[in-house]
């Protein structure tokens, strides 16, 4: 069974440029998460989807970040325009809809904004 | 807002030593999970605890859930270099999901 797939693995952009990350969750997993992780720290939830509905986007900086999960399968996270402080690893995870559900993570996209 | 505080933040020990990592909150957990993350990878689930006072063992790792379900600990016996990584607790309160602040463990051969 394929795991969570993320692309690209690495991205370097200049500030004020747009960037997009893509995630394909494990087949059959209806919950999808996007996290931001700074080096050595715990991931911080940006948005959580149940199927195609964003059920928690309270921590998503909506002035520059957007996300979509069309058809309730894969998802895209976009930043426009990027700022220096956005440099981090962006993790995608998926799980079966359950409050105790194990989250399966992709390898992440390491973003560097110069 | 980070509701789950982990301690210590960093830990560097010699192979064969024992260690304990703590995860604490002022809120009651519905359930709690422990993950380990290696460099360049996403976190991987180690265990889920649900019942207050619960103790689970996974080889050399022992996980304990506090009686009041506000704290948890992870104890590693005879640490090995392969245990090196970032240890994370995770929980949810109601519909909110949180990771802990993380404990970075380095086991020196």
Image: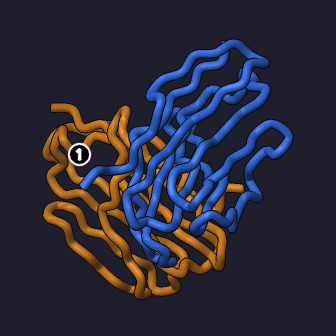
Chain colours: A blue, B orange
Direction right: furthest residue: A63
What residue appears at the point 37 percent right and 60 percent down from the top-left corner?
Answer: A27
Where is A8 relative to A45, above or below? Answer: above
Counting labels gives: 1
Could you classify mark 1 by the number of other residues whose Cα lies within 10 Å: few (under 14), some (14-19), or many (20 or more)?
some
Of residues B78 and A53, which is closer to you in this image?
A53
What residue appears at the point 13 percent right and 46 percent down from the top-left corner?
Answer: B16
Toward which corner of the image does residue B88 lie, by quadrant?
A: bottom left
Q: Secondary structure at mark 1?
A: helix
Is A6 situated left or right of B24 in this image? left
Q: Mark 1 — on which chain does it sit?
A: B
Q: Which residue is mark 1?
A: B83
Of residues B77 and A41, which is closer to you in this image?
A41
Is B82 situated left or right of A66 in this image? left
Residue B14 point in image, percent of width and height: 20, 37
Toward which corner of the image does residue A104 lie, by quadrant?
A: bottom left
Where is A3 relative to B58, above or below? Answer: above
What residue appears at the point 29 percent right and 79 percent down from the top-left corner?
Answer: B55
Where is B45 relative to A24, above or below? Answer: below
Residue A22 point in image, percent of width and height: 53, 39
What residue appears at the point 66 percent right and 27 percent down from the top-left corner?
Answer: A19
């Amino acid at each position: 069974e394929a795991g969570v797939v993320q692309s690209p693995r690495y991205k370097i952009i200049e500030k004020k440029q747009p960037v997009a990350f893509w995630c394909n969750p494990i087949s059959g997993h209806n919950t999808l998460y996007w996290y931001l992780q700074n080096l050595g720290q715990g991931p911080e939830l940006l948005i959580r989807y149940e199927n195609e509905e964003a059920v928690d986007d309270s921590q998503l900086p909506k002035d520059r970040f957007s996300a979509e999960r069309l058809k309730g399968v894969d998802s895209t996270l976009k930043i426009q325009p990027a700022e220096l402080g956005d440099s981090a690893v962006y993790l995608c995870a998926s799980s079966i809809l359950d409050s105790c559900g194990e989250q399966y993570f992709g390898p992440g996209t390491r973003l560097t904004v110069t | 807002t980070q509701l789950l505080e982990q301690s210590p933040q960093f830990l560097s020990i010699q192979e064969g030593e024992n260690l304990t990592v703590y995860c604490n909150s002022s809120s009651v957990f519905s359930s709690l999970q422990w993950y380990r993350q290696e460099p360049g990878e996403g976190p991987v689930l180690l265990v889920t605890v649900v019942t207050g006072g619960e103790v689970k063992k996974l080889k050399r790792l022992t996980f304990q859930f506090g009686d009041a379900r506000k704290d948890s600990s992870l104890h590693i016996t005879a640490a090995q270099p392969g245990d090196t990584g970032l240890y994370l607790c995770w929980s949810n309160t109601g519909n909110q999901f949180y990771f802990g602040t993380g404990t970075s463990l380095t086991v020196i051969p």
